[in-house]
Image (cartoon, rainbow, N blue to C red):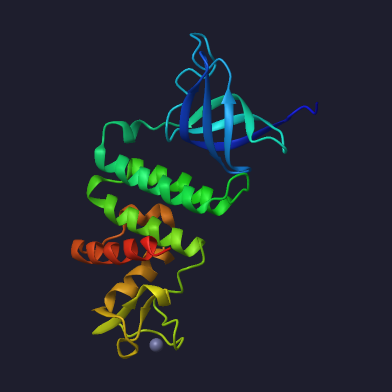
């Protein structure tokens, strides 16, 4: 029988369950191998090297045994690089983090890596764990926009995908999810403020780490968040 290859990857723990008496099945979203199921043998034993390391949304440096023909890989060790502490006692942070996790898992194929999605997941957890509370919604909005962009379903928000011309900055534009988002008012859709697509473009243009520091009026954040949720639920 062929031996598994020893590999190492950054990973985020997205699911875990008990297996037999002392072991656990750990689902990891990894940077290099995509989403994989792994067996952590002896994880429940008192002196296990996994003690405290196998917890939801921990970011770990994982030592793995990868066998290309098997569905269950081996997890030899997991060193926590960034813990889930910010999400344990803060309901709002946890909700945003779990939503990000669900979005990533919906889009990431099993056993196939997608470094862009992984980096969004990892960077997103860092931001959602550290952003000041009043900036969580704005941060989450910026992450959702990047998610749609990485999936290739979001045309540049300040350009109309129907006629490819730039959208006006004042007045109204149309919102039409099946066209990818924002279009000219006379082309249809639901009328919304013309400032929203330009706001979306600004949020996509700044470096992700600057999202919590971006200044925007709450009602605009709320309005754009509602539209972006609609785009995501239409996927
Ligand atoms: Zn147009």
Location of residue 133 with respect to 42 vertically, above or below: below
Q: Splitting the image into 4 quarters, where does residue 143 fall?
A: bottom left
At which x and y percent is residue 169?
A: 30, 82
Q: Above or below — where is 183 with respect to 207?
A: below
Query: Residue 96, position in %: x, y?
Result: 32, 46
Residue 170 showing in the rendered view: no
Closest to the observer, 103 or 132: 103
**Left or right side of 148 for 200:** left
Q: Residue furthest front?
A: 20
Q: Viewer-proximal residue, 19 or 211?
A: 19
Residue at x-position 39% and y-position 70%: 201
Q: Quadrant of the N terminus?
A: top right
Residue drawn at point x = 51 percent, y = 61 percent: 150
Q: Residue furthest left?
A: 219
Q: Is residue 162 above or below residue 11?
A: below
Q: Residue furthest top?
A: 46
Q: Report which quarter residue 56 is drawn in.
A: top left
What residue lies at 39% left-to-right and 32% top-to-bottom?
84
């Amino acid at each position: 029988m062929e031996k598994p290859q020893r590999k190492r990857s950054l990973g985020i723990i997205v699911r875990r369950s008990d297996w037999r008496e002392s072991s656990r099945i750990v689902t990891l979203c990894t940077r290099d191998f995509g989403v994989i199921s792994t067996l952590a043998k002896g994880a429940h034993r008192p002196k296990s090297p996994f003690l405290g390391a196998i917890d939801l949304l921990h970011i770990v440096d994982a030592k793995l045994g990868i066998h290309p023909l098997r569905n269950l890989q081996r997890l030899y060790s997991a060193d926590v690089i960034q813990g889930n502490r910010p999400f344990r006692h803060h309901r709002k942070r946890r909700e945003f983090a779990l939503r990000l996790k669900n979005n990533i898992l919906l889009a990431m194929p099993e056993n196939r890596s997608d470094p862009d999605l992984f980096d969004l997941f990892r960077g997103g957890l860092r931001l959602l764990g550290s952003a000041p509370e009043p900036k969580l919604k704005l941060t989450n909005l910026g992450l959702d926009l990047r998610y749609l962009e990485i999936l290739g379903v979001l045309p540049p928000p300040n350009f109309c995908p129907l006629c490819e011309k730039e959208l006006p900055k004042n007045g109204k534009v149309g919102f039409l999810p099946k066209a990818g988002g924002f279009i000219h008012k006379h082309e249809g859709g639901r009328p919304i403020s013309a400032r929203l697509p330009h706001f979306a473009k600004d949020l996509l243009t700044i470096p992700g780490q600057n999202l919590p520091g971006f200044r925007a009026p709450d009602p605009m954040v709320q309005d754009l968040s509602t539209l972006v949720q609609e785009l995501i639920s239409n996927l």
